[in-house]
Amino acid sequence: MKDEDHLKHIQDAINKLPEEFSILEEQIDIELQMAYFDMARKQRNTTPDDTLLAQAKLDLYNPEISLEDKKELLVKLAGLDDVEAFRTIEAFHKQASNEIKSWSVLALQESRMVIQSSLLGEQQVFISTGLGGKGQNIRYFVAMSHNDSDCSFNETQRKLLESEFRFFLNESEGELEEIDFHGNIATAVFLFPLKQNLHTIFKSFIDECNQYGDFLSEDVIITNVKKLALDELQEFINKNRHDREQN
């Protein structure tokens, strides 16, 4: 019941979103995103230097300037309502090294939103997750398990699970990007419309699969933060089953 209430609160918040919103497409570590927005929040309390743009065009490419100072420059540029600032970030992003590439993606997205908000006269909504998205779809990672912990998915069950999953996603304007089977665990990465009720769709999908042998557990792990490793999944599944048996 607690989990269902939590899901309901999330869905209520999603339903209140405006019709137009932007989703970060790239897959960027959540901790890095938090560090970016924390720096952005602090920088918004400072007055931009009139020489910032000229300084940034030189310092962003200067090997003597530290990585942290370059990150700060990108954050400051992203907060400017200035097309030239956007172009400066864009140019740097195209040749940025891996150690600052994701940071420049966030700065570029924020700069775009600042300029759009100014031009349209209304605040733009930007949604970011660890796994990113596409269009107005969020990317999710899901892990499903066999009802019998000692039994692997057989070939028939694998084909059924994949075909039914594709069908339910297509019906909801979602998209299956990848699916893998690891013994008694199935993992998948998929895109799904933010405003659709994912909980309801998954329940229907599991019910449909279980008409053919009741082989799929109703307990699933869904996240938009990151892909989980098999050992993490197995530990979570074992703990969940142990807790249920104790109750």
Image (spheres, helix red, strand yellow):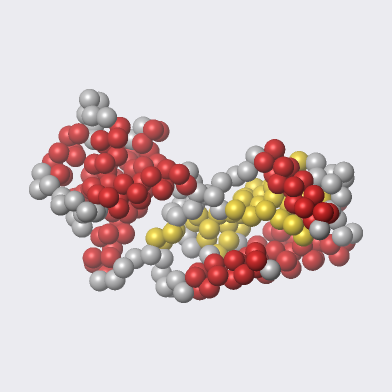
- Left or right: where 153 falls relative to 78: right
Query: Which image quarter is the C terminus in?
Result: bottom right
Query: In terms of depth relative to the viewer, which is nearer, 28 or 42?
Result: 42
- Residue 200 horizontal/vertical position (percent): 67, 69
- Left or right: where 193 falls relative to 34: right
Residue at the extreme front of the image, as rendered: 246
- Left or right: where 26 falls relative to 72: right
Q: Residue at x 59, y 71 (%)?
A: 8
- Residue 193 horizontal/vertical position (percent): 55, 64
Q: Residue at x 84, y 62 (%)?
A: 210
Query: Which image quarter is the N terminus in?
Result: bottom right
- Residue 187 horizontal/vertical position (percent): 69, 47
Q: Residue at x 73, y 42 (%)?
A: 234
Q: Is residue 107 visible?
A: no
Placement of 103 over or under 147, stated as above or below: above
Q: Is residue 43 visible?
A: yes
Q: Residue at x 49, y 53 (%)?
A: 129
Query: In terms of depth relative to the viewer, which is nearer, 4 or 143?
Result: 4
Quarter where residue 183 is shown: top right
- Residue 177 horizontal/vertical position (percent): 61, 50
Query: How many numbered markers are drawn?
Result: 0
- Left or right: where 182 falls relative to 44: right
